[in-house]
Amino acid sequence: MSAAGESREATPRRGQPVAEKISPWPFVGMAGMACTFFLNAASGLLVPPWAVAVLLALWGGLLLLGFRWWTPHPRRVALLPVVSVLLWFGLVNLGALLFHWTA
């Protein structure tokens, strides 16, 4: 084959899908979100039931944000578990300070 024939085969033809690299960051972020779910769900040992509902609602909002960011912003999804843990830590400590949730 000639050099022109080889370059023609290397370029995708019209109508054929082009394989793109898949970023691992959304998968990392969602695995982290799965871990933080259990942290929020087990908070009933520290906080009242209504506070667990608030924590889980915030976690659900972050999860939906992760679904939205999956393709356009894959690296941001990996930061969501960090935000979730920081929110949990801050809210549980704030509740302990203001409402004496923990003994």
Image (cartoon, helix red, strand yellow):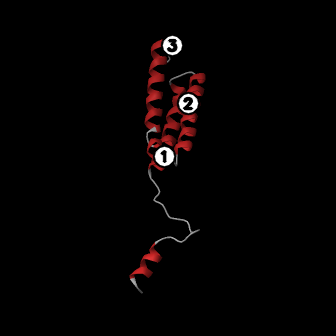
Looking at the image, is mark 1 or mark 2 earlier in the sequence? 1
Q: Amino acid at mark 1?
A: Ala
| Residue occupying image coordinates x 42% and y 80% | 4
Nearer-the-camera pick, 2 or 90: 2
Q: Nearer the viewer, residue 17 or 78?
A: 17
Counting from the top left corner in percent of width and height, residue 45 is at 52, 26
Amino acid type shown at disc 2: Leu
Determine whether 51 is above or below 32 in the image. above
The answer to whether one can see residue 68 in this image is yes
On residue 99, which mark appears?
3
Residue 58, numbered label: 2
- Would residue 102 be seen by someone viewing this image from the given angle? no
Amino acid at the residue labelled 3: Phe
For the residues bearing labels 2 and 3, Cβ distance under 8 angstroms: no
- Specify whether 51 is left or right of 86: right
The residue that label 1 is drawn on is 31
